[in-house]
Amino acid sequence: MRFRTILAVAVLLAGLPALAQQSIQVLPTLETDPVPGTGTVVQGAALWMHPSDPASSVLLVADNQRGLLLYRTDGTELSLLASDGVALGVDVQERVQVTGVSQSLVMVANPTLQALVAYIIDPTTLAIRSAGLTPITTTGFVPNSVALYVSPTTGRFFAFAGSSTGIVAQFELTGQVGDGGVQVTPVRTFDVGDGVVGLAVDDAQRRLYVVEQNVGIWRYGAEPDDDDARTLVDGVTGGGLSVPLGGVALYTASGVRGYLLAVNGGENAVRIYERDPAAHTFRGSFTVVADGGIDAVDRPRHLVVTNRALGSRFPLGMLAVHDSTNTVGNNENLKLVPWQSIATGFTTPLVVDTGGPTTPTDGGTPDAGGGPGTGVGTPPPEVPGYVPTDNPGSSCYCASVSVPGSMLLVLAGVLLFSRRRPRA
């Protein structure tokens, strides 16, 4: 009997890795209006969170033909910022002091000016305007990506810029934006190797993620005195990535929970890794397939993810994925997916945590916006399958018992049953 029990345990444990590394399909619920230009246009995306009305948050799309495009979270185009040139990357950092007021700062990688250019969005009109910061330039350096970072230990504010030549530059911004007194100091540069195609920063973990085209995803320290040592999160050679590679983004939850998401263009998919830098365990991947009048995502390059509630359309967070071959109008756009559709699609459900961040939102995660508490603490009744945890102060919800927990229960039952069976 002991042999049978051991065999049953072995079979159950052997199934755990397969359950944790699924490939699933998810359905979009909305899509943005197509970009105005044709061909390869979209070069980056971010999310500006409205400080008091999450449903009025704005998707920002870097357009290499027109400039910065602004979309509502229902997918409709809001406006176009084209006065300063085109855009190759965009990021948002919340709680930056702009003329004495804590606001979200939008930073754009602008190849026309060969600089990083800062903007703010008016919460009342949703109009975008200059933040009054002199463009950040470095001789001979043309930025194609940007990620903002606030150190959780020192409070110092930094901007990372990547380039197609593989160089990453880190700048420190001191002083108050908008009053003409901001000083920008280059504090660090390093050579990734091949061209940079994606940046993301985890503020709380003080980590910078860099996607090196044709190679993989690297993790660096984000502090200015960190050396250039790096760790490969996943790669093309011997790993799970397939070229062309694309952007990365962070779904942040309490503590070190959450996920690093990466575009895997060679498979039209998004790969998900645990956010915890101790392991970055691969959790699985998903593709966005056609649903009614919304076509599937093909050849994605960029993505945006947030754990914040965005009104009734996305009460538990949202993912937006770039689509290179949008069939409506034939111009590129973004497909919008509720986070819970992804989280509950896996046999082992992913974390769903709508609470605001306890530290400034990671610069490379295009989900910055309002301060702590902007997320909804309790999911609305119309969202099926979610029950609160036993901790009333927690904002984490689980669609079902996790698979590892379920397996432990099964194993306990097997062992108990084996002990209770009467002997022949």
Image (spheres, rainbow, N blue to C red):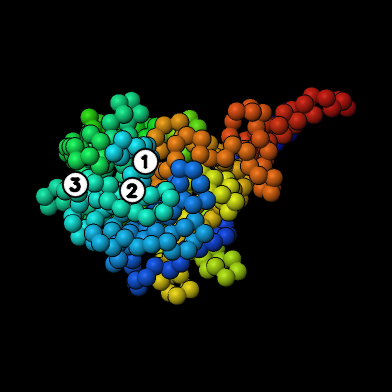
Q: Residue at x 24, y 56 (%)?
A: 110
Q: In the picture, which quadrant includes the C terminus?
A: top right
What residue type is disc 1 on?
Gln
Local SS, label 1: strand
Is residue 36 rendered to the left or right of residue 15? left
Q: Residue at x 38, y 62 (%)?
A: 79
What residue type is disc 2 on?
Ile
Q: Is 325 placed above or below 354 here?
A: below
Q: Is 323 placed above or below 341 here?
A: below
Q: Give the residue at the far bottom of this rendering.
A: 329
Image mark for residue 134: 3
Which residue is disc 1 drawn over? Answer: 103
Which residue is disc 2 drawn over? Answer: 120
Q: Nearer the viewer, residue 258 or 16?
A: 258
Disc 1 residue crowd, few under 14, some 14–19, many 20+, Cα 10 Å: many
Asked whether the residues under the numbered discs 1 and 2 touch, taking CB atoms below 8 Å apart as contact, a structural biologist would say yes
- Location of residue 234 in the rendering, given as x and y in whole percent from the top left corner: 39, 45
- Location of residue 241 in the rendering, given as x and y in whole percent from the top left corner: 40, 53
Disc 2 residue crowd, few under 14, some 14–19, many 20+, Cα 10 Å: many
What residue type is disc 3 on?
Thr
The image quarter containing residue 34 is bottom left
